[in-house]
């Protein structure tokens, strides 16, 4: 949901005390915004955070590759996130929302401008707004520890929404964009192939660097944007530019369940969730807690995980044989293997670890394949078109 299509009355406060929507601080500001004079406010509720009670990740039936890939992506951010590829109705968004529930808490700013204690640690007292400087001096907290939020990128997001724009009321400051609000959170782009190219580039640049800079006239501001990026797309609804596809670490195929027993179980759990989300969450509370602990432990162990030279050589040989030009191939392959090793409670990557993650790290990276992929799709569409035309002609 973007700021433009949310009205003050619709702003979801998520069960918290009612306050002015969109981080607006005064009725005057609200009136100006409503009259179209102010810039659209962009605060947490407008950035599209997910519903609080998500379908438990642990309750998702089947989809082993998707679940493993997503867990590896949050254990080791160096993997470069993940792209979920599959048709609609295959639990992609459900999985991402459930994944967020498994992550350890992070500090969240209490301030309109999103100041954090770490700003002061790194840049001194001038790095925060006057309000926060006063709070800091008075020993009041600038942030609270909160669970990680899922920031869902609206498909109609403009570059200004994504990067930030000058605050109309204090024009020397820039109002944070979605990318800055997603710092330390998880950023999800559903149907990334439908996103504007300029916006996609800006997101991927920020994701790769962990920060970005906005320049508007004489104002320059740099923001942290350290988030795990998860994208999803339905390959039947348009392709993704290879340059964009390449920048997602893991590429995970998500397919419909084929085993009737699994389908039935998935149906039952979906029914339980629809009737009572609390009941399903409670049913999987033990599994959820275990996954949370595993992720935390794997993250801590990751620092100790080493990749022996001979194992790395094997991986590089595969990449050369496949003819993958992008250097991101080995980064993702090796970092995913390290995450898997850590998740398995070990500290030395083996060739078997590489084997396990190689399909998700290396598929859809060969430029020749990408060209053929597009060509084959056109060929198939042409066949279909001629089939439809000729059957129309049949008496
Ligand atoms: Zn502040």
Image: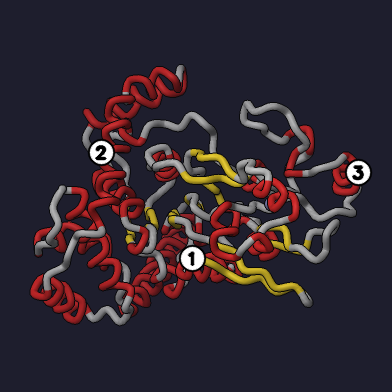
Left or right, 60 with respect to 15, comes to left
What label sits on residue 28 in the rendered view?
Answer: 3
Q: Is mark 2 within 8 Å of ligand 1?
A: no
Q: CA distance from mark 1 to mark 2?
A: 33 Å
Residue drawn at point x = 48 percent, y = 43 percent: 148
x and y percent of residue 347 in the render? 14, 57
Instruction: Please tell me whether residue 130 is drawn above or below residue 208 in the rendered image.
Output: above
Task: Choose between 85 and 33: the one closer to the eye.
Answer: 33
Task: Choose between 160 and 266: the one closer to the eye.
Answer: 160
Q: Write down the residue under mark 1.
A: 210
Residue drawn at point x = 75 percent, y = 73 percent: 219
Is label 2 or label 3 in front? 3
Residue drawn at point x = 57 percent, y = 61 percent: 195
Mark 2 or mark 3, earlier in chain: 3
Q: Is mark 3 within 8 Å of ligand 1?
A: no
What label sits on residue 337 in the rendered view?
Answer: none
Q: Write down the residue under mark 2.
A: 62
Disc 3 packing (10 Å; few <14; some 14–19; many ≥20) = few
Left or right, 47 with respect to 365, comes to right
């Amino acid at each position: 949901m973007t700021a433009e299509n949310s009205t003050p009355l619709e702003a979801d406060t998520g069960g918290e005390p009612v306050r002015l929507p969109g981080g607006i601080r005064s009725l005057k500001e609200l009136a100006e915004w409503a009259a179209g004079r102010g810039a659209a406010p962009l605060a947490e509720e407008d950035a599209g955070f997910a519903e609080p009670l998500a379908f438990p990740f642990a309750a998702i039936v089947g989809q082993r590759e998707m679940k493993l890939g997503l867990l590896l992506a949050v254990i080791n951010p160096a993997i470069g996130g993940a792209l979920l590829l599959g048709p609609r109705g295959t639990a992609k968004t459900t999985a991402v929302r459930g994944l967020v529930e498994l992550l350890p808490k992070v500090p969240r700013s209490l301030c309109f401008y999103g100041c954090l204690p770490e700003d002061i640690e790194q840049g001194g007292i001038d790095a925060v707004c006057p309000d926060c400087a006063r709070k800091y001096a008075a020993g009041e907290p600038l942030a609270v520890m909160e669970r990680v939020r899922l920031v869902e990128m609206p498909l109609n997001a403009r570059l200004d929404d994504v990067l930030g724009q000058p605050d109309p009321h204090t024009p020397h400051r820039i109002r944070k964009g979605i990318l800055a609000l997603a710092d330390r959170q998880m950023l999800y782009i559903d149907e990334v192939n439908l996103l504007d190219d300029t916006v996609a580039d800006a997101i991927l640049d920020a994701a790769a660097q962990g920060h970005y800079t906005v320049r508007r006239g004489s104002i320059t501001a740099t923001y942290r944007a350290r988030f795990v990026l998860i994208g999803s797309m339905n390959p039947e609804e348009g392709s993704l530019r290879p340059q964009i596809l390449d920048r997602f670490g893991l590429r995970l195929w998500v397919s419909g369940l084929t085993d009737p027993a699994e389908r039935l179980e998935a149906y039952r759990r979906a029914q339980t969730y629809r009737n009572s989300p609390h009941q399903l969450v409670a049913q999987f509370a033990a599994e959820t807690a275990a996954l949370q602990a595993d992720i935390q432990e794997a993250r801590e162990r990751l620092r100790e995980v080493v990749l022996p030279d001979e194992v790395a050589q094997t991986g590089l040989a595969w990449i050369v044989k496949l003819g993958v030009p992008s250097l991101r191939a080995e980064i993702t392959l090796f970092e995913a293997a390290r995450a898997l090793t850590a998740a398995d409670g070990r500290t030395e990557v083996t060739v078997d670890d590489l084997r396990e993650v190689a399909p998700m790290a290396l598929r859809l990276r060969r430029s020749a394949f990408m060209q053929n992929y597009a060509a084959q799709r056109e060929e198939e569409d042409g066949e279909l078109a001629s089939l439809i035309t000729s059957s129309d002609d049949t008496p």
